[in-house]
Image: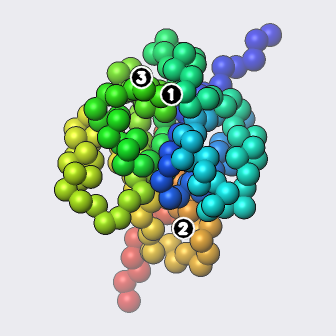
Amino acid sequence: MESAVKKRIIIGISGSSGVIYGIRLLEILKDIEEIESHLVMSSAGKMNVPIETDYSVKAVEALADVVHKYQDVAANISSGSYKTEGMIIAPCSMKTLSSIVSSYSDNLLSRAADVVLKEGRRLVLMPRETPLHTGHCKLLFEASQMGIFIAPPVPAFYNRPTTLDDIINHSVGRVLDLFDIDTSIVKRWSGSKSE
């Protein structure tokens, strides 16, 4: 008897602050049997892992089911014939955003995003830059016109976060909502209580 085909989700980690968002996504997806995670990390993303977290690059890669080299534009995820549910880039640098919006696919991170777009699959970007200048805003606007979901990791406070993990989990949980993956880590709004 053949085993069921897993749903594939690509996780991209680019060279912006906030690599913990991509790492947390991988941690969560690792525990979901039906999901096969594919990881692509830019060199700047790899550089930020030990700067911002207690993880090593090797430990982050171990969280993924499949790890792809950043420059391997012949990887399976570089082709539309290789079926995936879509892609999340967390964090998404302005450089990566720019290459995606411009369809400039000179590495696997931007190529995989381009493939996801051309195949009509879900592409979610978690841009991590502030403040934003007009060029950034223009790129984000153009990305949204292309059908890209823009999900900056902006914390919610109605859920009364008490730890950094609460804030991180809420942001990645809301991104996974876009793929209909409910991990029960999001404290959902249930309406206000009138006095």
Residue 118's place in the image compared with 41, above or below, is above
Query: Counting residues from the N terminus, which is met first, the one under dot 3 or under dot 2?
Result: 3
Disc 1 crowd, CA 10 A, few/some/many (<14, 14-19, 20+): many
On the image, the x and y values in percent for residue 55 come to 72, 55
The disc at residue 115 is 3
Q: Residue at x 68, y 29 (%)?
A: 66
Query: Counting residues from the N terminus, which is met first, the one under dot 1 or under dot 3?
Result: 1
On the image, the x and y values in percent for residue 45 come to 56, 47
Question: For the residues marked 1 and 3, what is the alpha-carbon distance in whole angstroms?
Answer: 10 Å
Query: Counting residues from the N terminus, which is met first, the one under dot 2 or under dot 1?
Result: 1
Please indicate, yes or no, whether residue 123 appears anywhere in the rendered image: yes
Residue 171's place in the image compared with 192, above or below, is above
The disc at residue 167 is 2
Kind of element beneath mark 1: helix
- Position of the N terminus by quadrant: top right
Q: Are marks 3 and 2 in contact (CB under 8 Å)?
A: no
Per the image, the residue denoted by label 1 is 108
Disc 2 crowd, CA 10 A, few/some/many (<14, 14-19, 20+): many
